Amino acid sequence: MMWMCVAVFLLWLRSGGCTEKANTSELIEYTAADFYEKLHSGKMMFIYFEHQVSPTISLFLLELEKSADALQDYGVLVGKVNCDKQLVQAYCTQERERHTAFLFRGGKEFLGFDLDTVFDVNSIVSEVLFAILREEVKYVHTDTDLLAMEKAARGKKDIVLGYVRSLGTQEHRSMMETAYVYGSKYQFILITGGPVLKHLGVDESSPSSQVWFLHCRVHSKLPLSSERCPLTRMRKPLSTLSLHSFLQLMEAPVVSEVYDDPSSVQPPQFPYQQTPQVFLFSRPATKQQDLDTATALAWRLRGLALLLLVHRQSPAVKTPDEYNAAYRLPEKSSEVKYLTLNDHDEVLELFTNQEKEDEDEEDDEGWLEDEEWLEDEEVDSHFAKLDDEIAASVYENRGNLPDMDSITQLTSDNFHTAVSQSSLMVALFYLKWDAVSMAFLSSFIEVAERLEGSEVQMSAVDCGEWTDLCAAQSSLPIPFQPITAFPCVLLLRPKEPAQLYRGMLGSEALHRFILLSLQASPVLLSTKEEVTSFLQEVPRPELAGYHPDRVMGLFKTQLHTGVSLFTEAAKSLRGEMMTGLLTNGLAEKWAAEHSMELPAVLVFPSWRAHTPPATLPVSTSSEELLTHIHSALLHPLPELTVENLPSFLSLGKALLLLFVGEEEDEIGRKQNQALVEEMRGVVEVGGGRMEQYLACWIHLGRTPAGMSVLGSYLGTMPPLPALVLTHLPSGDEIYQFPPNTPIVASSVLQWLQRIQEGGVSAAGMLGEDSWPPAVEFLDFLKIMDIQEPDSAQQQTPEEEEEEEEEDSKEEDVDDSSSHSDTFHNNPHSEL
């Protein structure tokens, strides 16, 4: 019982039970010497290597500080190293470390976490514990996977199965904290969706997290035993304390036999004090039959009530024979109510109805005091059920709008003046009721603050207010087409067409794009020194550590027809890469030194340093040239990241995707390197056959989100490395290269051939790409149809005549028509 007491105390403490304890933790700042000392001691550490602190990083550091107390109870030290003060060579010198926090275990780097996945105290604690317990906490996707887990646990361990909508949430944290304490006693399984939910009777659109207890340890002793372990659903909202109480209840005896009158039986003691008691009465002549009936009913009441079988043969039992059942509720611990039941199902109905009444009472409490507040709460309850975490977060913080002093508010009145007076205007078109717009607005403001004092003017347009501007309906010419997707970022220059930003909706990607856009495109190169600077140096100090792709055009004269095509293509690439133009004698000299003929377009991919550039053929149009440039920039075996995945998916090719794990030592690093080289061999040996595929790989240490992707693809985490074929243009099937089979180029090519011939079964299916409105009041098209039903209907001449006659009878014709004109001409009307 000692370990149980420790578990109770630890779980109670983690859930905030010790309310009198102030949060006095301070984020520990380690020196380089301290870091190495702790590292070599073998302690687990969660460390962030701090560089320049932006507003986003400041918020992360606050959350990191909050997590220090929580994680120390699990033996994890939390802190930071200031790279400006103390240089840790392996972690203070690369760009990616600025956006990554690291978990160290056993004196080695165990896992890296992108800051986008550890953004608050809940996500930090849950993700760190999930990483520590990733061998203990299993992930299933299909009912077949769950059945296999049940068979493996039968007679050994009970299973705790948790469904959470998203990783990194409070519910995910509760599951991981409980798994840390009870992991040796129960088998914990985590699901975030998939076909297994159908077996559990859950609609995947359900917003609530849920937990089930699978009784596998005593499976053979259960009544009506089948191949499946009986399961009990936890009916309370998922939290650390409620989960702990639920597990305690699952340890209670199925049926307790007593020989006292129910009024003399003690109310439930800790930890069952909040659980109702149900009494059934047994007679000596039917003792075994009564016990079997009580056991069957007890399993149906599991998690709802404790069942006690009262033996009437004892003289202490004074209950009249007319009663065959009784119950006691926890809030009325001394009162026992007696019943005469015709069917034991009535007991089950009694407690399921009681449970619903309790929930209704909690929901209704205090709501009738203020009708307006009632409506607000109704809206809040809808947002509490949103499956979109961004939308829910934005709505919860709807009263805390960001400070927009650093950006210019554009309107129909000042738009043209503002653009004409700025050498570069970066404009964000957004909607206040669009969750992604409001989430991105904070990043946009952060970029504006970083660019303050530069030649860049950051601005924003509220398209819910200035609909005519966003619809490009101004009386003056607008340099862009109507805005149809939000948020939208355009780069505007006087007397030039607008340039659309297509990158990631994050501050770093946008900041880098804007800085590159300040470079001329193409840069006119007139000296040998300028060519060397263009090819080797960073274009701006703020881009130190970033190596953009470069494209250089070489032509004999400025009047060559290819120059205009190249210039047009370069303008389209502005902000994405660096482009340079070399002409006349210097171009001829440079071409002669490098043994090439003019005209030529050279492409220098950032991933191919110290090797000759790719030389492109002469194109007949700028569109054709852009296609050749993008093809030349494509890595033959790219590493997928969250940032570059959209651009690769846009190619429309099937992904031949290799998943490799985090290297624990030099041997692991070499093994991963060998696997990548083998995949490169697949591309080279396959030749033309590989044109339909994009061979790529993902490092789960650098891109931990890949673990969730792989789990969703196959329904469970397979052994690594794993090779899958997915996103086929012809269908949604997902194929897995046979696990535990060496990944060799020849074997992979044969496997791809068998897939084409239909000789390989799919291992999974991609989810449906359906995005209906999360709740009814977000179905804006439906709302608009309701508000203006006449606008969508064609009226017959007869109907129009009848309407005119009715209008002529109205007394306030002028007022009505005036109101109509005002509505239709008002540029500020709602979308």
Image (spheres, rainbow, N blue to C red):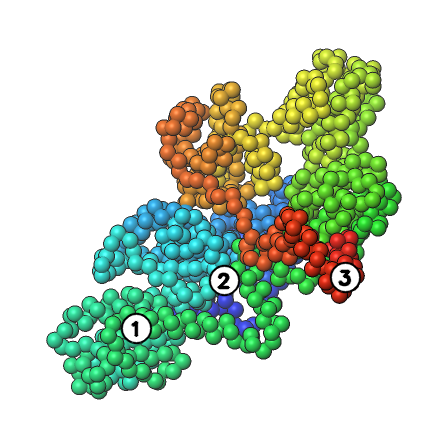
Q: What's the mark number on residue 73?
A: 2
Disc 3 target residue: 813
Q: What's the mark number on residue 347?
A: 1
Residue 304: percent from left, percent from top: 35, 69
Label 2 – label 3 distance at C-alpha: 75 Å
Q: Residue at x 67, y 39 (%)?
A: 502
Q: Residue at x 23, y 85 (%)?
A: 319
Amino acid at pointer 2: Asp
Q: Residue at x 53, y 57 (%)?
A: 169
For marks 1 and 2, give the one nearer the viewer: 1
Q: Residues within 10 Å of mark 2 (few under 14, many from 20)?
A: few
The mark nearer the N terminus, 1 or 2, is: 2
Amino acid at pointer 1: Val
Residue 251: percent from left, percent from top: 32, 66
Q: Note whether 635 is above or below 295 in the view shown.
A: above
Amino acid at pointer 3: Val
Callouts 2 and 3 close, C-beta under 8 Å: no
Q: Regarding mark 3 in the picture, which secondary structure is present there?
A: helix
Would residue 441 be found to the left or right of residue 65 on screen? right
Q: Regarding mark 2 in the picture, which secondary structure is present there?
A: loop
Looking at the image, which is closer to me, 236 or 94? 236
Q: Residues within 10 Å of mark 1 (few under 14, many from 20)?
A: some
Label 1 – label 3 distance at C-alpha: 67 Å
Q: Note whether 286 is above or below 726 in the view shown.
A: below
